[in-house]
Amino acid sequence: MLRLVAGSLTIALLLSVVSFPSQQGGAAQQGSSVRGNAPRDLSIEWVGGTSYSTAKTPAEAREALEALVTGGAGQHFIVQFSRPLEQAERERVQSSGITLLSYLGNHGYFATARSTTLEMGLLRAVPLVDARPAQRAWKLHPMLERGQVPDWTVVESKNGSSIVGTYVLFHPDATLHEQSEVIRRHDGVVRDVIESLNGLVVELPFDNIKALAEEDPVQYVEPALPRMGTTNDSIRALTGVDTVQAAPYGLDGSGVSAMVYDGGTAFASHVDFGGRLTARDSDSLSTHATHVSGTVGGDGTASGGTNRGMAPGVLIESYGFEYDGSGTFLYTNPGDFEADYGDAIVNWGADVSNNSIGTNTETNGFDCAFQGNYGLMSSLIDAVVRGSVSGGVPHRIVWAAGNERQGSRCDVEGFGDYYSTAPPAGAKNHLSIGALNSNDDSMTSFSSWGPTDDGRLKPDFSAPGCQNGGDGGVTSCSSSSTTSYTVFCGTSMASPTVTGIVALMLQDYRAQFPGPDPRNSTLKALLAHTAVDILNTGPDYQSGYGSVRAPAAIDFMRQENFTESEISQGETLLYTVSVAPGDTELKITLAWSDVPGTPNVTTALVNDLDLHVFSPSSVEHFPWTLNPLIPADLAVQTARDHLNNIEQVQANSPEVGVWLVEIRGFNVPQGPQSFSLCASPNLINCASQGLIVLDKSTYNCSSTASVTVVDCDLNTDDFVSETIDVTVTSTTEPGGETLTLTESGTATATFFATLPFSTVDSPGVLQVTEGDSVDTLYIDADDGNGNMGVMITASASVDCTAPIISNVMVTDVTHIGATIEFDTDEASSALVDFGVNCGSLTEQALAFTPTLHHVVQLGGLNDGQTYAFTVTATDPAGNSTTDDNAGGCYDFMTDDVPDYFTEQFISFDLDGLSVTYVPNGSDESYVACAEAVPSFPNNPAGGTTLPLSDDDSDFVSIAGGQTVKLYGVSYGSFYVGSNGYITFTGGDTDYTESLSDHFDTPRVSANFDDYNPSSAGTVSWKQLSDRMVVTWENVTEYGTSNSNSFQVELFFDGQIRITYQGMASTDGVAGLSEGAGLPTAFLPSDISEYDTAGCGCAPAMVASRTASGNLNAYTATPPVLGGTMFFTVLAPYSNGVILATAAQANIPLANGQSLLIDTSASFLFSSAILGLPFGSGQMAVPSDPAFCGRTAATQAILIGPTAGGPPFQLTNAQDVTIGP
């Protein structure tokens, strides 16, 4: 297991500074960004780490591209551009012979050439800045690249190699025949096809995976996910379902079909289903599935209606996740998911699906690195939402967020319960549901929290899934009889609550509106728009947008204050919202079902839409954003959101009048992108009351202003893009400029134009100077309220002076982060560029809110690392100043996280090793080393057996006044636990091998696991002259018949040695605990990688090697420097020697023969000639410290007495290691 590096937690927020396009989607306005159009460094955030390259000139990039394609048509490579491509530019790329494939973020793509000859002239007008081949590491999940075999993927082990389950994603242009040939070449077997993503489920030898990833058609290989597992009167009351089931709504889900995809199929004979539930596959019966189905649509017949579900008239199609129809599998099979969804939607008309399942990473002991991941399964879910299995017709999916906060094993990133969303709950497009208590809307103790690894919001919202008091959970149908109920708690219960509410919304929608059902994104926007904010103001990583309310969602939907549309790169669509006197809140919610993300890269968002909202006085209001580096912080409304596919702007006590809402296609590499928009109090596409808006409230002296006018009366011809004139003036140029605005399209009634500013007067340019006021004037001929010739204005100020930076300082340095603070003389936003040296500032962090004192959090850093940084301040007008400390950069060093000498395993790798912890007086208290050994240092024979039962502990007292030590504290006794540990202040019987349990008391965990020595094996102890020895020999894990042997030596001088000989267990916790609780800055150790020489001179050791005869090597004290080593031969020999030898040595024997010995050590102690019939010998141990820790072979040699016989025969051997 590799030690977790904090820097592997990639937060996309650090990369969100880009050049903002104008409303027409062109280049950034001058001064609007601290970066130019050509980035100095190109980066792509791969799952395994970030790659960097230097931007090429256009000519260099075209030359590199041409060199790549000469290798042959159909090869795949990476291209990267300096900005988003306009549609015309994409067409040029396509016409040149290049096909852009999967999007990689930061304007990069996988691509292929359709010919070895490109039309290079077409690429001259394209902002290409790099072309390079793909590296294997970018196509492999980092676990596979490291050579780590996930246990749950192992299907079979033979000939020393594991056959493992994988997901293999191919480039979109790879045919199924090509895929099959690739898999065949690497001895793989195709278990299923993932048509939505052009992928396969493959089992193949683990040793062949890296070669498979080298294949050109292969885009990505990742380990199969762990097998997914399963994760009502009060919930009806809390969500308001009781209200909408009753008159005047009268909703019960009739006419709606819901798919329940679960750990098995539901019990169709339960009376609460009334013949409305059908099991559609052959999976086994599951009470969990029955319970979930009852929450979605049971009618409560067996309880007199008390335990009825959300939509008691809905049809239910029940499916169980399985491998290939057999009902048994070791890992999650996306092919089954795709096939079942296709069957349910296409053949049985499923309108919405519930998924109360997940990988349960925390509780199942799977690799914690999976929490927060996106990956292939999430990408598949996003594809299905967009209609990949239903002919392009969107589908609605509800998914349980997971119960990962049940333990603390995975709280290793330094963020506590945050970042606990396990795949595939981190997909983008489904409705991810957290769990609340139904009695009081409080957060449950188990519901998973966001963000995802790329900083996205999860869950989307929450619903009741448990209860404090009452039935203690959610009561719903059971499989035990046709009338029985049972009580469960979990996000598994919250998800079907929302699924049932969606069924009610679909039923009501069909009654209110003609046409197709609403998109999944529309439902997400409606539910987020009307949810109750129960925790922090705005969205949060605990409950999402809040607690779902059915009446509010349905009432708002009936008002028709929502719309669905689509947008392409560079486009801007406008809407207006009317605010009347007395309206207390304005809320705008935008959601879209994004293109499936590329699993190779960390950032899941592909198409990035921006929500811009302007008040009647042209003040812009920003959407809610959260800081994934400080996940507990409150949401703010000061910046753009470039992470999520849902955005919301909220304003309390809004300004009366018409507000302008812009949806901008900020970065739409794979468009057009459909979206859903909700607005309150009143969304209107157009109005007679004119509106004029400037895009900024403050400009600098070289800015370009964008002016927008919206007025329905100006659209006099639906087939022509018309024009209007407005006047723009400044204090310096009071006569101003007449600006002609052009309609954005036919019949849009929205008019745009831009006007450049300058300190020098010239035609078509507005002259400005510091402190000017800029005013725009539009004459509204008729405002629709009986007023004629109304003057509509918008104003802004001019600021041409850059801010001054002072008092740069570094505060709050930790092992994974630091805070940069500085002051400015005017309100500004802040940017920190940082990296491992001044010449490579490859990372960025921002604080968007304009202020005088700036606090910028840096996160995702490595411990014990020096970082250089510069600070940049940008005022609202776009004037920027950078402080680089006179060219030398500022710097700081992160704290070095101490080694806590503890590792939690999912794949135990210490077998055959001896690990020694030597006190050294440092802050860490010990230095550790590990080395391979052939056997236990001490033979447990003759020790005192402890009569330990399952989950038991026994007391051991140390005789003779001796003590052992742990972290400098002396103990005259200790407690031996059956579950693989020794405690010192009291006995412990805990069998849950979590990090928090390990650290809760002074403890030596040899391998903290659930062992049962009463079933098999022994636990014994013995006291030697210099140590206490405790041995677990051939003990079994609970419920198994396997065998595990390990030994702990507690030396009286404070050293500790743990040796493992024959370990079948694959999990557990090993290491030392001071007993102060789980450290805040804990990073797991990698015990097997401790340096062999790290301890200097380890304790003395005697270990037998297999041979014939009887040689007993012993000492009154262990073999130490300057001491004496004694040997005794316990069997008669006619003639022989005992010797300890190192380098090649020619040793004379008593009968005149000589013996040439060559062993691995480096010195010869002596030889002792033994007479008949047997005897003993001794030799001096050198006092030279250079010999400390060396190993010598001690051998008994039988000399052949017969002429012509063998010159010698090795009869036994032992290894001795010299101690200090």
Image (cartoon, rainbow, N blue to C red):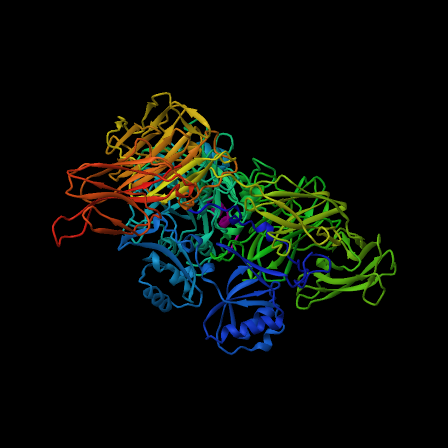
Residue 604, given in percent of the width and then of the height, sits at 51, 54
Residue 506 vs residue 728: left or right? Answer: left
Q: Quadrant of residue 291?
A: top left
Residue 734, given in percent of the width and then of the height, sits at 88, 58
- Whether residue 298 is visible to the viewer of this picture, yes or no, is no
Residue 1080 vs residue 790: left or right? Answer: left
- Whether residue 102 is visible to the viewer of this picture, yes or no, is yes
As rendered, which of 318 and 257 lies closer to the eye? 318
Tell me: residue 564, above or below residue 915.
below
Residue 258, given in percent of the width and then of the height, sits at 41, 47
Overall secondary structure of the magenta stretch? helix
As rendered, which of 535 and 1136 lies closer to the eye? 1136
**Residue stretch in magenta:** 503-515
What residue is shown at x 39% (from left), y 41% (from top)? 1188
Question: Is 507 included in the stretch rendered in magenta?
Answer: yes
Tell me: residue 335, above or below residue 1165.
below
Q: How many marks?
A: 0
As rendered, which of 92 and 1133 lies closer to the eye? 1133
Residue 897, given in percent of the width and then of the height, sits at 53, 40
Tell me: residue 1024, above or below residue 609.
above
Image quarter of the C terminus: top left
